[in-house]
Amino acid sequence: MLQDFTQGIKDVMLDKLRDVHTIIGGKIVAFDPAACEATVLPYGKFKKPDGAMMDYPQLYGVPVYVIQGNGQTATVAYPIKPDDECVILFAEQALDTWRTKAASNTDLKFDLSNAYVIVGMFARPNPLITEACADEAIIIDKSGHRVKLKQDGDIEVTGVNVKIEAQGDVSINAGGNISMKGKNVSASADKVISLSAPSNPDGVFSAVGWTAGVTELKP
């Protein structure tokens, strides 16, 4: 009798837990960058009340986590594409109030409709993680074009073209040498281009094939 009672309680609990969702892996089916929402497909199957197994349905309008803060004035943005893998989390409460700031009468807990997504959790390892750990570095990479911040203070920038734009001044200060090398190196200014070397016996300035309108050369 007691054993049957205990089993009955277990069956009821398992039946209730069938509709409680926590965390599951999935993939992006489509992404709307303007709304920062995705259509996602959870991996795996779930058991229906009749015992049959069924694929998880696609979830629509799921908010996607990106790195941002300070009132959204500080952001790390990156492309999110179909088939990107992700982690799907299911909230304890409905997301209506958080998303619309309006009162909600929905009382769904851990439901499929309360999902949000974190992109970046892939099943396969990323070799950049091995490199970052070996060099104790932070690496920002897009298809081999990268910025690498190393433990020793070195910063490496690798790309097809590197462009710097500023509305104000651009200053480069170095305790060591500054070198520029390229097929063509050009510099232009509305007024003056000034180049100088320290006035000591080792301070040398040289210019080969130099032409300019107004130029200051200071030894």
Image (tube, grey):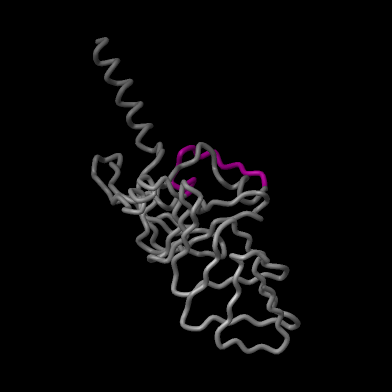
Where 164 sits versus 120, above or below?
below
Left/right placement of residue 200 relative to residue 52 reads right
Residue drawn where x is 63% and y is 60% of the image: 173
**Residue 99 in the figure: left or right of residue 66:** right
Residue 61 image point, x, y percent? 50, 57
Give the residue furthest to the top: 2
> Would residue 101 be found to the left or right of residue 186 on screen?
right
Q: Residue 147 at x, y = what percent? A: 47, 60
Is residue 42 at all visible to an observer of this figure? Answer: no
Which region shows up in magenta? 102-116
- Residue 161's place in the image compared with 14, above or below, is below
State the residue in front, 12 or 171: 171
165 versus 96 height, above or below: below
Front residue of 121 and 83? 121
Q: Position of residue 163 (x, y in %)?
A: 56, 73
Q: Magenta region, mostly helix, strand or loop? A: loop
Instruction: Decide which of 204, 43 is in the foreground and name it.
Output: 204
Residue 113 among those drawn in magenta: yes
